Image (tube, grey):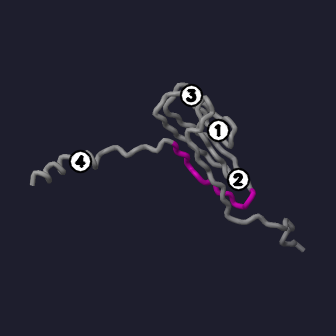
Amino acid sequence: MNKYMYLLAIFPTLVFAMPAQTPFIIRPDQCVALEQGQSCFIDITVRWQTEIKGNYCLFIDEVKNHCWQSAKAGTWKNELEMTRDVVLSLKDSEHQLIYSGKVQYAWIYKKRKNKAVRWRMF
């Protein structure tokens, strides 16, 4: 009986413990265009968190986009236009990769091969 009382004393801490936060979040992680090859526009949010305070930069397809100075966490929101998959990565001041993620490009209809008009008026 004593061993069950011990479990009941520990159980509330297990139930109410804070879930571990993901250190690098990209939302949304997919952009859908109507037709293959068309530009897709999304409002994207990137959140990150590290254990060590430092200077970090967000790269979009290896192009520096935004930097934070003396930070352990950051948030970046912006509109993104894409016609293919885009890789977002967080790097430190020595350009060492900390986190990386991808926004996938998708489409509903395949690109038409023949662009001829399919209807006639007369």
Q: Amino acid at mark 3?
A: Asn
Range of magenta residues: 24-37
- Residue at 72% x, 61% y is 35
State the residue position of label 2.
Answer: 84
Measure the alpha-carbon separation of dots 3 and 2. Answer: 29 Å
- Residue at 34% x, 43% y is 18
State the residue position of label 1.
Answer: 59
- Whole-percent x and y of residue 93? 60, 29
Measure the alpha-carbon separation of dots 3 and 4. Answer: 39 Å
State the residue position of label 3.
Answer: 55
Q: Which mark is residue 12?
A: 4
Q: Nearer the viewer, residue 28 or 93?
A: 93
- Whole-percent x and y of residue 88? 62, 43
- Whole-percent x and y of residue 89? 61, 41
What crowding class fits label 1: few (fewer than 14 Cα within 10 Å), some (14-19), or many (20 or more)?
Answer: some
The count of marks equals 4
- Numbered disc 1: secondary structure: strand
> Which badge, 1 or 2, is on the more N-terminal residue?
1
What crowding class fits label 2: few (fewer than 14 Cα within 10 Å), some (14-19), or many (20 or more)?
Answer: some
Where on the picture, by quarter, is residue 109?
A: bottom right
- Numbered disc 3: secondary structure: strand
Q: Locate the C terminus and report the quarter of the image it occupies.
A: bottom right
